[in-house]
Image (cartoon, rainbow, N blue to C red):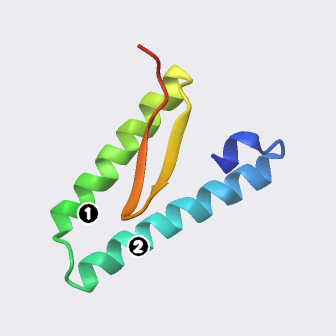
Amino acid sequence: LLARVQTRRALKAFSLGVAITLTALVGVSRVYLGVHWPTDVLAGWAIATALGFYAHSRKIPIWIMVLPHGFGVGLYTRF
């Protein structure tokens, strides 16, 4: 989301790099700590990547909602 609003190419690349690095580190740490199987982490990365590509290609905003016991993420569409 940050990369979309950046006008300078260097800042856009930096914000994407930080996001990808943090995502990879969180996934690897979950496997290392033994709280997830590697296939769980890979499936999560695959689903998130597919959702991101779909939303970007269709120009659909993604919403993030903080809930009492976690959070929700989805595509903002009206039916």
Image quadrant holding the C terminus, namely top left
Q: Residue furthest front?
A: 68
Residue where numbered disc 1 is placed: 41
The residue at the point 83 percent across, 46 percent down is 8
63 or 44: which is nearer to us? 63
In the displayed structure, would residue 9 be above or below residue 29?
A: above
The residue at the point 47 percent across, 22 percent down is 77
Q: Residue furthest right?
A: 8
Instruction: State the CA–CA distance, disc 1 to disc 2.
Output: 9 Å
Q: Position of residue 15 (x, y in %)?
A: 67, 57
Query: Is residue 14 found left or right of 28 in the rendered image?
Result: right
Quadrant position of residue 59: top right
Q: Earlier in the sequence, mark 1 or mark 2?
A: 2
Q: Residue furthest top?
A: 79
Q: Position of residue 37 (x, y in %)?
A: 16, 70
Q: Position of residue 44 (x, y in %)?
A: 29, 54
Q: Which element type, helix, strand or loop, lies under badge 2?
A: helix
What amino acid is at disc 2? Answer: Val
Neighbour class for label 1 at 10 Å: few (<14), some, many (≥20)? some
Neighbour class for label 2 at 10 Å: few (<14), some, many (≥20)? few
What amino acid is at disc 1? Answer: Val
Query: Is residue 56 found left or right of 32 in the rendered image?
Result: right
67 or 25: which is nearer to us? 67
Residue where numbered disc 2 is placed: 26
